[in-house]
Image (cartoon, rainbow, N blue to C red):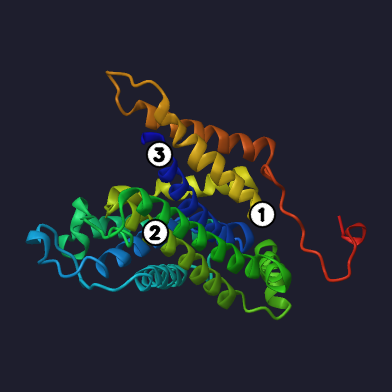
Amino acid sequence: MAWEYYLVVMLVYLGTDLLAVWGLNLEFGVAGIANLAYIVVVAAGAYAYAIVTLGPSSGNGGFQTYIGGFTLPFPLALLVGAAAGALVGTLIGLTGLKRLRQDYQGVAMLVVSLMVTTIVSADIGLFNGTAGLALIPNPFSNLDPDTARWAYVALVAVCCLIGFVVLRRFTTGPMGRTLRAMRDDDTAASAAGKDVVRLRLVVQAVGGAFGGLSGALLAGFIGGWSPSAWAYIETLAFLSCIIVGGRGSDLGVSLGTLIIAVLLLQGVQFLPQIASSPGLSEDFGWIILGAATIAFIWFRPQGVLKERRPRYRGESPSKLPG
């Protein structure tokens, strides 16, 4: 049934967006890293999953060219996607984490995003250029369609559950307090003996792994991936989820993802089409997204759910400063 298929698609999109937004929130919301190249790690995971599952490029009539070409079993291919995201996230972090201010870091990473998109689009030998990769295998393709769809929803749900448990290890407790101290005043954190550069690279790697896993799951579900799927504006959509939901709040950004990535960006597809401007409804979604983001920055910068200050063991809420 059409409604069942649509529900499956929305649940998969919600789960993959949650993984990506959690990873970016760890970097930007908790650690204060303005990573405007985050969509690159999502793409790295998608491409890595594709080239380790598609087999040699000579297969399927050789209509697409790409590097590598292996046939790894599930779930090893997903782990490769997550590892690719972590590696690329670390490499991106090396471009500007040591001496640049946060705003300069954001500009440097935005340039990295544009450069990578241009290179991948221009070089057909990497990932088939602007045409992208197709026929990416679904791990449940041997099942009947209805069972396969819900099996994929279950897979994404399990990945989200594991991801949230891992995420909480970094956003709560001593590590969470250290990362927030680095976000609020990296000079003071360094003076207190914290290796700010190492911490930032660790966060970039972990956040990249979240993004890589998100991309791998999405590529396996839709069966294709091309440069049009990871334009830099997609990172801004993830940032909007964080700003609207509540920067630094795990539950807040989860709610923001539901509002922005699912209800807003997908909901505009139900608007009536205008014959003279068939793409206007999609553009209208981005316009609303921008307006909502600006409104929250001005009138409720803490987001829907305010970030809760980490509590020390044995400390009562009344004794917290502020």
Placement of 223 over or under 208, stated as above or below: above
Q: What residue type is labelled 1?
A: Ser
Tell me the quarter of the image containing the C terminus. Answer: bottom right
Instruction: Residue 101: give x, y in percent of width and height.
Output: 56, 62
User: In this view, which residue lies farthest toward the top?
Assistant: 275
Instruction: Residue 167: give x, y in percent of width and height.
Output: 60, 65
Placement of 207 over or under 76, stated as above or below: above
Residue at numbered disc 1: 249
Q: What residue type is labelled 2?
A: Leu
Earlier along the polypeptide chain: callout 3 or callout 2?
Answer: 3
Residue at numbered disc 3: 6
Indicate which label's residue lies in the foreground, 1 or 3: 3
Residue at numbered disc 2: 217
Question: Tag 1: Cα neighbours inside 10 Å, few (<14), some, or many (≥20)?
Answer: many
**Secondary structure of residue under mark 2:** helix
**Residue drawn at (84%, 71%) of the image:** 313
**Residue drawn at (49%, 48%) of the image:** 14
The answer to whether the residues at label 3 and label 2 have Cβ atoms under 8 Å apart is no
Q: Within the image, what quadrant is residue 134 found in?
A: bottom left
